[in-house]
Image: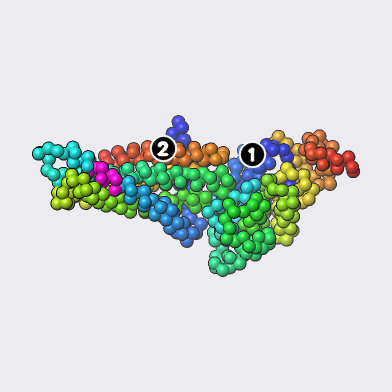
Amino acid sequence: MIIGESGSGKTTLLKCMVGLNELNSGEVLYDGRNFYDLDFNGKKAIRKEIGMLFQGGALFDSKTVEENVVFPLSMFTDLSESEKRDRANFCLQRVNLANANNLYPSELSGGMKKRVAIARAIAVQPKYLFCDEPNSGLDPKTSIVIDNLIKEITDEYDITTVVITHDMNSVIEIGDNIMFIYEGAKWWEGSKEEILKTANMEVCDFVYATKFMKDLKTKF
Amino acid sequence: MNIFYHFGRYFLLMKRAFGKPEKIAIYRDRIFEEMNSLGIGSLGIVAIISVFMGAVITIQSAFNFESPLIPPYAVGVAVRDSMILEFSPAIVSLILAGKVGSSIASEIGTMRVTEQIDALEIMGINSAGYLIVPKIIASVLFNPILIIFSMFLGILGGYVFGLMAGVVTDYQYILGITYEFRPYNVVYALIKSGVFAFIIASVPAYHGYYTKGGALEVGRSSTKGVVYTSVLILAFDLILTQVLLV
């Protein structure tokens, strides 16, 4: 998980990782392959291994839920129409959206959009899943549903998942390895147990910013 | 300097857009979708404008040709040549630049600011090709049909309103529209309409594709797209007229 204050550079880092931003320096390695050293086809091959959950879902407005999930399958597989539909239905059922196939994104709630985006991301069985603030704009209950879904899918499909967030509930709920970004640079790295005990001032300011977290710290 | 920057970026975008497509079948379906939304959807406005343009040219020509030295069938000649040479290809293209151009710029601009284009890129899809090429091909294929439709309706509108206003007779008008007809004029108009169609689809797409920000910027991109498209249509109208007619 990559955490940090708003404007600290989390999304910029994520966009560099998935190749949406050009790098000034450094490298991005996928199983030893430096993304920015690859030619067009090499980059394209890596991108087919990537699934991404955008902050706003980034669903295609002109397509229904089912068409959104079928879309990457149509572009990159030779499955028949019925096979593509079956795969889409399987993915939609996996994110608990079995009866929303014919709805358009404008008819969905924020949580439903995120779930459709997850279904679309896992449709082509990616090796890497990137999530940009998956629970921004969601109520706490739906946030937990989305967090758990990401965790379950990561374990179930054995994929590497990178989550950008500033929600400490998510960090405690699903974080394994946590990186804290501060003023555009990596400031701290560790596990969720370590982050709750760290003495690093900037990290503490961020982790214990809410009254709930302060109370929790006092309690334990 | 800014103009060179935009020209360079526009040509690089076009080069990228016309790269190898991921799946021909998907592009083919998209072309038909775009023909429907950009072409068929414009038939109504093109019909209304063409009929009224033809009618106005007929009445204005009749009013200005009140001289014994000008034969009465000249009204038909004026309507035919005005519609074929200029009004149908250029004026209808300017109208389409407003209608279709703003729709393309705002559609692609909205996709940019809502990260839908990023989503395409992440999937390994050439977003420029997927979004822009079907629009350009649909526009280039369908615009000449719209222009022929406009020529026909303009000349028909001139006939109907000319007779209703009593400024020209049935015989004089038909004699005029068939008098020394040059088929090359239609070819010239179709070449112009093809070039204008490319501009109408690609320039607003460029402005939409590079939108940054939010809803306000989408509106600005749409406006810029329409303005630049209109200016380029007028500039290419002059260039093509010089090259093809003179």
Q: Is residue B56 magenta?
A: yes
Residue B74 placement, left or right of A23: left
- Chain of the residue under the numbered disc 1 shown in the image: A
Query: Gap between marks 1 and 2, in whole Å?
Result: 39 Å
Identify the residue position indicated by label 2 in the image.
B227
Q: What range of the chain is rendered magenta?
A: B51-58
Q: Quadrant of residue A155?
A: bottom right
Query: Which amino acid lies under the numbered mark 1 shown in the image of this protein?
Result: Ser
In the rendered image, residue A119, in percent from the top left (x then y), is placed at 64, 58
Residue B129 placement, left or right of B161: right
Identify the residue position indicated by label 1 in the image.
A25
In the rendered image, residue B192, in percent from the top left (x then y), is placed at 31, 46
Q: Secondary structure at mark 2?
A: helix
Query: Which amino acid lies under the numbered mark 2 shown in the image of this protein?
Result: Val
> Label 1: few (<14), some or many (≥20) within 10 Å?
few
Q: Nearer the viewer, residue A176 or B166?
A: B166
The colour scheme is rainbow
Depth check, mark 1 against mark 2: the one in front is: 2
If the image is split into quadrants, where does the C terminus of chain A sit? top right
Q: Is residue B158 magenta?
A: no
Please report the residue visible at 46 percent of the width from the left and 46 percent of the height from the top: B104
In the rendered image, residue A106, in percent from the top left (x then y), is placed at 58, 52
Please report the residue visible at 63 percent of the width from the left and 56 percent of the height from the top: A116
Residue B182 placement, left or right of A82: left
Q: Is residue B53 visible?
A: yes
Q: Nearer the viewer, residue B236 or A50?
A: B236
